[in-house]
Image (cartoon, coloured by chain):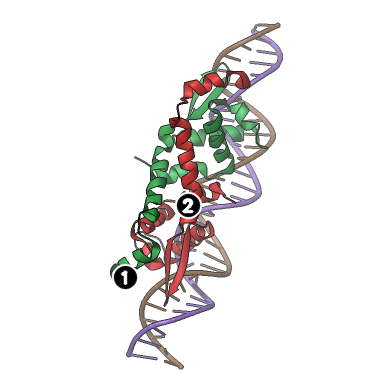
Chain colours: A red, B green, C brown, D purple
DNA sequence: TCTTTAATTAAGTAAATGCTAAAATACATC
DNA sequence: GATGTATTTTAGCATTTACTTAATTAAAGA
């Protein structure tokens, strides 16, 4: 269920990352509002928002003609969990040298 | 300095993600060893490793003909920090509705 | 209803990506 | 020095990506 590469791919574009980052800080914003930060067309912004929504990172709701986007916490939770697990690996006692020694057998 | 989109792009490929994940768990491993998990050529693996190294996520050292790769914690630390900051935004009291209300002015 | 505002979908294109086979590099061993 | 092992670099190719303009959908207000 958790497709981390897809989540990473969604955040790999500078425009999309900036959109998610801004929505995290400022909360719900419209497509047009989000697009003003960039020198790209409205369709380009809409396509980026579609990719983020497809990846489960954003949700959308309608208010009149506007479409209001916000971050879907569940869409990022696997990423957060993986990131913290990763940090665990290098913070919980075992450094690179120790792992290297431990792996001498299987690696050799 | 912290180019998060580049970090995300490096982890957006399933092969590269699996490589990093395995190196986190098992520590230093050789290029050939890492490649055995996938049905792609050795050059393809080498190119993936190059991208991860370019992104600062992996380091490499030589032992005879082998090239041993391991995770460079600093290369992931910005990602981990951002992920936790993101979680803060949705866990520290303010839910989507509250943020929406707060932004009525600027958004309108 | 006609116009304006907001956003999306569609179609086409240039650039980037991930792969392959072939060639090159590097070290170890015979 | 020749051979085998491990890996990388190069060149070429098919697919995917991010963008554009044009057309479409939808709601608001005159």
Location of residue B36 (image quadrant): top right
Residue A43 seen in this snapshot: yes
Residue B48 seen in this snapshot: no
Task: Estimate how packed mark 1 is, as few (under 14), some (14 to 19) or many (20 or more) residues with alpha carbons within 10 Å.
Answer: few
Location of residue A31 (image quadrant): bottom left
- Percent position of residue B29, x then y: 56, 26
Task: Give the residue furthest to the front.
Answer: B93
Vertically, is B49 above or below A45?
above
The N terminus of chain B, quarter of image: top left
Q: Which mark is residue B104?
A: 1
Task: Give the residue furthest to the left.
Answer: B105
Q: Which mark is residue B9?
A: none
- Percent position of residue D11, x then y: 59, 36
- Percent position of residue B102, x then y: 30, 66
User: Which residue is found at the position 54% from the left and 17% from the top?
Assistant: B63
User: Which residue is found at the position 42% from the left and 35% from the top?
Assistant: B75
User: Which residue is found at the position 35% from the left and 54% from the top?
Assistant: B92
Task: Estimate how packed mark 2 is, as few (under 14), some (14 to 19) or many (20 or more) residues with alpha carbons within 10 Å.
Answer: many
Q: Chain of mark 1?
A: B
What residue does disc 2 label?
A: A76
- Percent position of residue B70, x then y: 50, 28
Q: Secondary structure at mark 2?
A: helix
Q: Is residue D3 left or right of residue A43?
A: right
Camera-side residue of B53 and B20? B20
The C terminus of chain B, quarter of image: bottom left
Q: Are marks 2 and 1 in contact (CB under 8 Å)?
A: no
Camera-side residue of A73 and C19? A73
Camera-side residue of A75 and C15? A75
Location of residue B7 (image quadrant): top left
């Amino acid at each position: 269920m958790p497709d981390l590469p897809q989540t990473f791919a969604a955040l790999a574009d500078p425009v999309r990352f900036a959109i998610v980052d801004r929505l995290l800080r400022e909360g719900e914003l419209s497509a047009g509002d989000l697009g003003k930060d960039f020198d790209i067309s409205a369709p380009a912004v809409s396509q980026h928002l579609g990719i983020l929504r497809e990846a489960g990172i954003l949700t959308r709701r309608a208010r009149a003609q506007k479409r209001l986007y916000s971050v879907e916490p569940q869409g990022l939770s696997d990423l957060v969990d993986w990131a913290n697990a990763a940090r665990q690996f290098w913070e919980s006692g075992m450094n690179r040298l120790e792992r290297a020694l431990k792996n001498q057998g299987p690696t050799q």
